[in-house]
Image (spheres, rainbow, N blue to C red):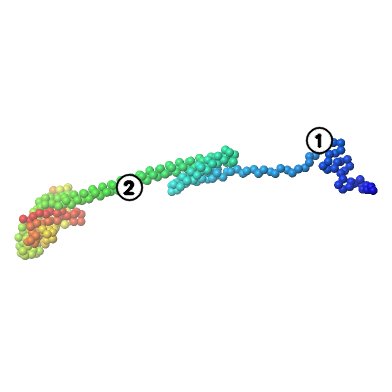
Amino acid sequence: MSMPTPPGDQNPVGQAPTGQAPAGQVPTGQDPWGPRPAGPAPSYWPPYPIPVPQPRNGMGITALVLGLTGVVLGLTVLLFWLSWLPALLAVVFGFVGLSYARRGLATNKAMALAGVILGGVGLLISAGVGVFFVVVAKEVADDGRAEAARVKAEAAAEEEKEKAEEKARHLSFGQSYTFENGLKVTVAKPQPFDPREPVFGHAEGNKAVEVTVTVVNTGTERLSVESGLPSVNDANGASTELVIDGSGRQKVLTGYVLPGKEAVGKYAFSLPSDAAGKAEVEFTPDAKRWANAYWSGPTS
């Protein structure tokens, strides 16, 4: 039984249009091994895009930052000793960045090169400032040692001077000592003294001696004797009493001594009989300015 033809010249479902071969079949009368007829190319899926690698610019950027840091720290007086580390890292990272740029893995060759240069400059600055501070520290240390040696030498010289002056101030009776103001003082050997009534400061049984002090002005201006009273120690080092009697023979040095002139003072002292064989006389023309000079020796 034959099927009726659909109206409107419509083809049944699944049938190819009139004059066309079914899909996947070669049209009638065409060589299956011949060239394909001209026409639109069959549709297909586009190829999957290959990802493009990102440039590895981190090493160059890091080198530049570290190089700048090294230079800045190197120019800072208090932080120069820290600059060598970032400067050295800048050189290392910069060379790595240059290697990446040569292989096409990075695009900031100039930045990496700048990091290397700045790192080198930072190292030079760090080394130069370090050497400068070492030299300065050595000079300061040398100056300190020289100053300490100078002070020590001055102290030793001053001590020797004081010892020499102290020794020079210890004389025997009859010798002279010139003070810094130009007064030349001589103390004669003590002579026996016979007190007369009334007597003060002389105990019975003691030995009284007379001490004569002569002061000569060797300068060109008049000089004053502010403390013209000597003190006398007996053979045991004990202080003795000043004897005052009614004879009027004692004379106290006081007032001014003209240039080239001399002044003489006479004093009597009472020494214990058991310590009267030796005496020491202390005298200074001005106790506020000059230390005492000492004259010693036997009294008989």
Q: Residue at x 5, y 57 (%)?
A: 192
| Left or right: 1 in relation to 55 | right
Camera-nearest residue between 258 and 299: 299
Task: Tell me where residue 77 appears, x and y as whole percent.
Answer: 43, 47
Q: Quadrant of the C terminus?
A: bottom left
Question: Type of residue at label 2?
Answer: Gly
Where 88 falls versus 208 (above or below)? Answer: above
Q: Is residue 65 visible?
A: yes
Label 2: how many Cα within 10 Å (few below 14, some 14–19, many 20+): few
Q: Which mark is residue 33?
A: 1
Name the residue furthest right.
Answer: 1
Camera-nearest residue between 42 and 273: 42
| Left or right: 292 in relation to 113 | left
| Left or right: 271 in relation to 226 | left
Q: Secondary structure at mark 1?
A: loop
| Left or right: 216 in relation to 62 | left
Would you name the residue on which mark 2 appears? 144
Task: Tell me where residue 228 appears, x and y as whole percent.
Answer: 14, 56
Label 1 and label 2: CA atoms lie apart by 109 Å
Q: Secondary structure at mark 2?
A: helix
Q: Which mark is residue 271?
A: none
Disc 1 and disc 2 in contact, CB within 8 angstroms: no
